[in-house]
Amino acid sequence: MNALAGINPRLVLVVLDVLFASAVGFLLFSRVNEARTLWLLRGYLLLVATAWFVQRFANLPLTSKLVDALVLACSLSLAILWQGELRRLMELLGTGRLAVLLGNPQKEFRATAGTVAQITEAAGRLSQLRRGALIVVDLGSDLRPEDFLNPGIGIDAQLSRELLLNLFAVDTPLHDGAVLVRGNRIEAAGVILPLSRHSVSRYGTRHLAALGITERFDRCISIVVSEETGTLSLANQGKLERPITSSRLQELLRELFSTAEALPPGRRSVGNSPSESLS
């Protein structure tokens, strides 16, 4: 008791402050995969730490004001640069999905050997017919109905090439939306996805929807068939690879599926995202 009574309460608060800040910093660093983003985050946190040190331990009013102004300017710049990520953070906090923030998705990915073949054959046929299509494959993320603008119509049917072709037939009421695939089952059709705010002038609605959902969920990919050209594309982690052939799509799906099956539920990434190609 005497030893505890001799502890300075202000020192305890400072230690707790540093520990909590370190925990937040560690969480942020563990959630960043891109090197350039990691550099920006490191620089910003170093600047914030410098401002805190100057304000708390140095009697330098002018320097403190300058550093505060610099921190504010950097904060505004990062808010504009990372507006999509910050919006996603607010969505997760608002829905209480802390498991996603902590890198602990609730579901594991399971698919049969024929899943890749069924999706590839259907996408290749849709491409030949120049029939617009959008297929979202959940690789073990925490997708919920509230993540969509419209959750569509529940299907819960065995995945098959024929069913995918029928769902995207032009005379059906569900062909304009996305089809949601989990494992070897089709969960829903006619799903309306949130659009990406990036590259708005470069892509059509289907491509923006494919990018939008993959920007919000790492363990989620989208396959797009252009209605105008029949071009095949694959969106992964907010990046788009296009145009691709059916054989290239099959190769990418096999790689992503095998990586997703090998990852434990706590891992966030599903592998290296395809680089964007406009050639």
Image (cartoon, rainbow, N blue to C red):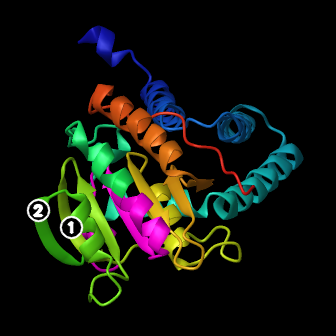
Q: Locate residue 117, reporting x and y percent.
A: 31, 46
For this rendering, which residue is in front, 164 or 86? 164
Residue closer to the observer: 208 or 115: 115
Residue under pointer 1: 163
User: In the rendered structure, which disc, 1 or 2, sits on the residue that comes first in sequence?
Assistant: 2
Kindly report which numbered mark, 1 or 2, lies closer to the viewer in this rendering. Answer: 1
Q: Are discs 1 and 2 less than 8 Å apart at CB?
A: yes
> Outermost residue, top direction?
3
Q: Which quadrant is home to the C terminus?
A: bottom right
Q: Is residue 140 above or below residue 188?
A: above
Q: Amino acid at mark 2?
A: Ala
Asked if the magenta segment contains residue 127, the reply would be yes
Q: Secondary structure at mark 1?
A: helix
Residues drawn in magenta: 122-150
Quarter assignment of residue 13: top left
Residue 232, label in figure: none
Q: Quadrant of the N terminus?
A: top left
Q: Nearer the viewer, residue 265 or 65?
A: 265
Answer whether residue 186 is magenta in the image.
no
Judge whether 180 appears above or below 239 on screen: below
Q: Is residue 49 left or right of residue 257?
A: right
Report the residue marked by disc 2.
157
Between the C-alphas of marks 1 and 2, the distance is: 9 Å
Whether residue 194 sits left or right of residue 182 in the image: it is right
The image position of residue 263, as x and y in percent, is: 32, 28
Is 60 placed left or right of 90 in the picture? Answer: right
Q: Position of residue 194 (x, y in %)?
A: 44, 73
Image: 42 above or below 1: below
